[in-house]
Amino acid sequence: MPESLSHRHLLEAADLDRDDATLVLDTAAQIESALAGREVKKLPTLRGRTVVNLFFEDSTRTRISFELAAKRLSADVINFSAKGSSVSKGESLKDTALTLEAMGADGIVVRHSASGAPHRLATWVAGSVVNAGDGTHEHPTQALLDAFTIRKRLGRLDGVRVVITGDVLHSRVARSNVRLLHTLGAEVTLVAPPTLLPVGVDSWPVTVSYDLDAVLPGADVLMMLRVQAERMNASFFPSAREYSRRYGLDADRMARLGDDAIVMHPGPMNRGMEIAADVADSPRSTIVEQVGNGVSVRMAVLYLLLGGNA
Amino acid sequence: MTILIQGARPYGEDAVDVLVKDGVIAAIGEDLSSTAETVDATGLVLLPGLVDLHTHLREPGREDTETVLTGSRAAALGGYTAVHAMANTDPVADTAGVVEQVWRLGSDAGLVDVVPVGAVTVGLGGERLAELGAMADSAARVRVFSDDGKCVADPALMRRALEYTKALDGVVAQHAEEPRLTVGAQMHEGERSARLGLTGWPAVAEEAIIARDVLLAEHVGARLHVCHVSTAGSVELIRWAKSRGVQVTAEVTPHHLLLTDAQAEGYDATFKVNPPLRTAEDVAALRAGLADGTIDAVATDHAPHAAEDKECEWSAARPGMLGLEQALSVVVDTMVDTGLLTWREVADRMSVRPAVIGRLAGHGRPLEVGEPANLVLVDPGARSVVDPAALASKSRNSPYAGRELPARVVHVLLRGEPTVRDGEVQK
């Protein structure tokens, strides 16, 4: 596997052109088959390399996924949980970056509540920065694992009709998926109440609808986004119940999907809010599979960014 | 002190000699002679000293980022002879004591006339009027009142402020931002904010307040000044209000004349400012509004910030950017070199009208015999690349770093005394 990505960092889905994105997915598939049936699920690729998981925001599942990915590539992994930031108390992002730089981090996986924090970090360090979710901006490895999951289930991405439903306004998952899926040739439709779509969404390469029922029959993939109930306090919608009724996925709605259509959710789910329990646990659901695919895709990203000239 | 300025071009027009004596223009003519110090001003444009309606000098409170002295140096180097110092200091300039302190620091620095702006409300709290009359009657002679940084959002309070300042020959300078529409706002709301995942600051949050305030000003017959107009819609509203005879004036910043929200790409918080950088269409409308006089003045909104308040996450950064030292260059770049303003109109928008709005005697006066010698000489042909490290300001948050801009301030006189000679500040 001699190839590498065109950018040194993975900050947003736009860093990946179609060749790059396909390379990540292919590499993830190769890693999966290389590890399949092995007793020791570990590759020596990143031996001697140091990966820092720099999490300014709690996210056990994403941190564990990156940790496992790095460890399976034999990298040394440090978990750096930096509660607070220059916003509140404690060390500034820049000082943290310079500290990690001095320690010789080869890769920094960063999760931050501020949009653009990984971009800033990337200007201060020599190592590769991987965005593990920044504010309401992007979460590119989530989009990669979603694309990987779709390709695995449906066999292709080109021309696949993906409906993304929920709080698009505040969703980094939606932003990354819109960009990446478009790059990979899928057709994306966003469904949400108008209050949860950003002003300016009309410039995105998507179709927008306010009516979930209208778009269900044509969907190959239905991706449900997490909706935080506290949004209703800011009048994005009147009540959790009304949201659920209009935009939630229950068994009745699921029944209107095509035979091969799949249901995705980036987690963590609000069962009963955007997705009903019986839907989440149905055979159409890829939710648990997405978690496993996340490790493979993150291994591929770390390998392609850090595995080159050791 | 007597100085003979030889070969200067008043308003960029025909070259003349100007004799400055005892703080006033003593003679204007061809081939004047004098035994006094002479300044070779061949090719230089002569303008009345510039007047800034909107400067943050940070003293008292944040002397680590700017002081009245360092800000005065920056102002003089920018061609200014008077600057209005905004009230959002710590403590807030909401009493006669604080405005007099700032005024005294300015006169001690002695480089520009530092004119304090008084807060409209106590502590910028937006709840009750500060003692506007006491500030007006103080040694600082405050005429401009502003809660800048915060909007006087309560419509009843804004009405009272407008009414009350009529007795003081004062003006309320409104920071037009409906706070409920800008909760957490980080940048202009549009395509870029949607993509960058930064909370949007919609144009309507500015326009709604301007629409309300021009109607209030009309209703009570008071003067209103609108700070840092940033949207095409705001220009339209002000044009409409003026056509109705409302006593409204408005300012635009250099950065809103030049830069757009494209600067937010990369999340470099140097470009975070309030109101935010807008779209190219807004920039075009602002230029047109300044050209046709709908917008009366260019005001810098010079806002020094410490490095740690800019070298951080965008959402954690403080809004604001430096402006005093490059304002004239940006105006030349965006308005003169584009043919939108003559030099005479530059003098009008950067000196004459701001002085009238601020009720400053002795500034913004015509270049005529007997007038105060508050003068700036500009080399219109010079071009230079902005180096933040070379600025006189104590802070480095210039949005023009690395940008080549035209025009250079060569000499500045404050009441006949040189404050800048050959581009060097004198104190």
Image (cartoon, coloured by chain):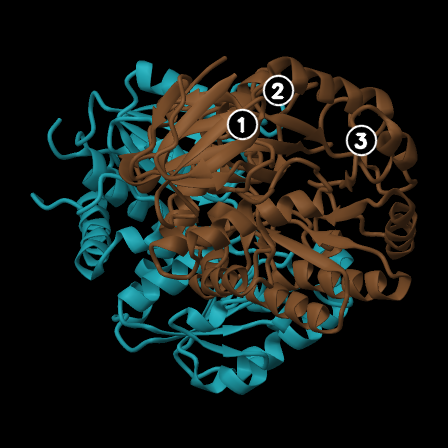
> Residue type at mark 3?
Arg
Classify residue B345 as left or right of residue B138. left
Specify which label sits upstream in the sequence, 1 or 2: 2
Specify which label sits upstream in the sequence, 1 or 3: 3
Secondary structure beneath dot 1 equals: helix
In the rendering, which numbered label is found on residue B309? 1
Q: Closest to the observer: B200 or B29? A: B29
Chain the render paints cyan: A
Real-space Cα separation, disc 1 to disc 3, in angstroms: 33 Å
**Discs 2/3, front:** 3
Residue holding disc 2: B68
**Discs 1/2, front:** 2
In the rendering, which numbered label is found on residue B411? none
Q: Position of residue B370 (x, y in %)?
A: 60, 36
Residue holding disc 3: B141
Chain the render paints brown: B
Label 3: few (<14), some or many (≥20) within 10 Å? Answer: many
Q: Quadrant of residue B369?
A: top right
Picture residue at 74% right of the left edge, 66% below the top: B211
Real-space Cα separation, disc 2 to disc 3, in angstroms: 18 Å
